[in-house]
Amino acid sequence: MRTDGTNDDSLDRRRVLQAGVGMMLGGNTTHGAARAAEGRGWQPAPQLLADLEKRGTTWLFRERDVPAYTLPDPLLGRDGVRVTTQGEWETRRRPETLDLFRQHVYGHPPRQRFRVTGEVMESAAVQDGRALRKLVRLTCEADGRRFSFPYSLLIPQDAPGRVPVFLLINNRAPEVADATRAQKNGFWPAEALLARGYATAVFRTWDVDPDTKDETQRPKGVRGIWPEGGGTPGRDAWATLSAWAWAASRVLDSLTDERALDAKRVAIVGHSRGGKTALWAGAQDPRFALVISNDSGCGGAALSRRRFGETVTAINRGFPYWFCDNFKRFNDREPELPVDQHQLLALIAPRGLYVASADADFWADQRGEFLSLAHAAPAYGLFGHPGVKPDEMPPLDSPLVRGRIGYHIRRGGHDLTPYDWERFMDFADALWGPRAR
Ligand code: GTR
């Protein structure tokens, strides 16, 4: 399968040694994770483990069962040279890493430039006039073809200056993100966001590319119009997560035109499959100033090589349309992946990055999500920003914020909750300065 040797661990190690930084990968092995698991930070509750055991869980959910693994060094180029400056990262290793994710994991999005126009379908005051609601229909055009999808926007009316925005990718039912606020849901606590001085926008995944294996539905989405995106069918044509990430960038194009908004302060937020998408959108589009993944798990923040919870094989079987076809070649062959997910997080450097996990969410590999963030630190280091260390996983409900990086693990299960949102806003306040209340 390999022709370039970049995913050959022994070769990588030899190259690192040649580059004179032989200790680097030592810290990236499973031994580091095992040590971290013994630390003072989060530990899985014995009751949760016992419950999984009782249910006869067949997938890996105990730290002791994690196989030995070696992660690719995010700064080590395919030419065997380790980048040491921001400039080298931006011009060499970052584009190369992005390309590896497009080629082997998510597929290539379209390469065309899109003309994006927004038509305001509805505009109304909500919350006794304290916020303005807009329903916008976006039309994206390129090479004589077009695709349209809606998004909603809520803007606080009393905020001084241009307002930062939280853009949510809604991967659930429309009701959980009802902009009219006739129905309210903790998944998108819009009132809380507005009260803290933030605007918030939302689009729904299904409106962009149907979240189903049923390929007869495909023509309804953007991949019905541009089926292969910028890749090759059967290999690295774009897949659903790439289509949703593309849509997030098109919404951002449109937010940039809103005079009340601060387009330099847009946070992209997603939960689970939406969290995978938020990371992929943030990795590709540097205009997202803050990237937030909640319980994103496999193909999101979690390290694939740990094989903890959902594995590459499991996700490719369950959701074959999320990733490009090349990704299926790594079923049960994670060590051969030329990238692991810490490198996806590294692509977000030096921008704000927040990863959130949940105590009972073993399927998403809570510790793997944290370790990924820790191993993205070298990229932040190039910009002079501190990272977190593998053995610094914080205890339950105790957010860890260091510079441009934040993390928490919350009590409870797989969900996006008001607690998560409050922490995301705390982090945005810390990055951008608190908003007027
Ligand atoms: C699960 C899937 C996860 C995650 C989740 C969700 O079934 O295995 O990768 O995406 O769905 O989106 O809620």
Image (tube, helix red, strand yellow):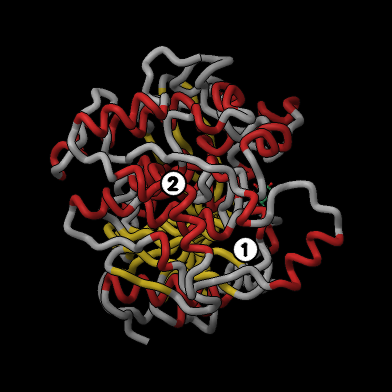
Return the x and y of residue 96 as percentages of the image width and height.
Answer: 30, 29
Residue type highlighted by circle 2? Thr
Q: Which residue is mark 1?
A: 177
Query: Is 12 drawn above or below residue 133 in the view shown?
Result: above
Q: Is residue 395 left or right of residue 210?
A: left
Query: Is 235 drawn above or below residue 129 in the view shown?
Result: above
User: How far, Cα to Cα, is label 1 from label 2?
Assistant: 40 Å
Q: Is residue 92 left or right of residue 164?
A: left
Return the x and y of residue 126 as percentages of the image width and height.
Answer: 54, 76
Query: Is 4 drawn above or below residue 267 in the view shown?
Result: above
Task: Check disc 1: other Cα within 10 Å, few if <14, some if 14-19, many if 20+.
Answer: many
Q: Earlier in the sequence, mark 1 or mark 2?
A: 2
Q: Is residue 400 visible?
A: yes
Q: Quadrant of residue 92?
A: top left
Return the x and y of residue 50 as percentages of the image width and height.
Answer: 79, 67
Q: Which residue is mark 2?
A: 29
Is the residue at mark 1 in contact range of ligand 1, meaning its CB lies under 8 Å from it?
no
Which residue lies at the image location 27% right of the left edge and 48% below the top edge?
Answer: 379
Which residue lies at the image location 13% right of the left edge and 40% below the top edge?
Answer: 87
Which residue lies at the image location 38% right of the left edge and 19% below the top edge?
Answer: 5
Return the x and y of residue 400 as percentages of the image width and height.
Answer: 40, 73
Residue type highlighted by circle 1? Ala
* Quarter of the image that includes the C terminus: bottom left
The residue mark sitting in front, 1 or 2, is 2
Q: Is residue 257 visible?
A: no
Q: Secondary structure at mark 2?
A: loop
Choose between 4 and 289: the one closer to the eye: 4
Tag of residue 332: none
Choose between 74 and 179: the one closer to the eye: 74
Which residue lies at the image location 46% right of the left edge and 43% below the top edge?
Answer: 341
Query: Is 387 drawn above or below residue 378 in the view shown?
Result: below
